[in-house]
Amino acid sequence: MKETVGSAALSGPIKDSQVAAGSNITQTSVIHHHYSPDKPEPELTLTLPDPLSILQSLDNLTPYDLNHAREKFVGLRVLWRITLSKVFKEGDGRWAIAGIFRVEPSYRSPIVIFYLSSVPPELKVAQRETPIWVRGAVKYVADSSSIWLEDNPELLRIEHLSG
């Protein structure tokens, strides 16, 4: 903590003052500067099931069972790390964000898609493949390769690529 001491001399009538006594007032104030130490960012932990696990759980189902199985994931709260793939504006003014959930080694990389009302500045300058931690709820398991999240999920961390 750093302290700065300053003083101010005030002059003038002190009549009717509730705290002043005498004809000369000197005021000293101490200002405390509180600096937050550099703390590491909190560790984010992927929630399960992850996008790949969800899609794999649907792979061997009959068409009859598939729709019901997809519905069981709707509303599931998730925290996933995706890599930025596409950002584009829809006709209704919303921004569609598509990211790829990467697990190595894997023959398949699920796509996670969601809408934002506006694009945050950090995302406007992000490069393709930029890792993004997103927290939200599953809106729809679309097909064998994509999962939609509810609109305006939280973008907890955008890990800018150096290079």
Image (spheres, rainbow, N blue to C red):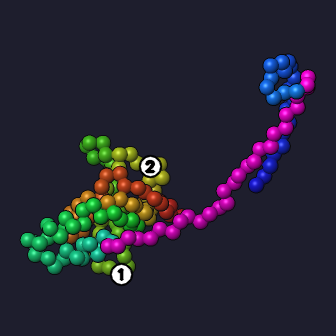
Q: Residue at x 34, y 55 (%)?
A: 97
Identify the amino acid type marked 1. Pro
Q: Which residue is mark 2?
A: 120
On the image, the x and y values in percent for residue 120 come to 44, 49
- Say if 158 sits above or below 14 in the image: below
Pick whichever, 48 or 11, lies toward us. 11
Is residue 10 at least partly visible in the picture?
A: yes
55 sits to left or right of 6: left
Residue that carries the numbered disc 1 in the rendered image: 105
Q: Amino acid at mark 2?
A: Pro
Image quadrant assignment for residue 154 = bottom left
Tell which of 74 and 22 is nearer to you.
Answer: 22
Between the C-alphas of marks 2 and 1, the distance is: 32 Å
Residue 38, quarter of the rendered image: bottom right
Q: Which residues are magenta?
A: 22-49
Q: Residue at x 21, y 70 (%)?
A: 144
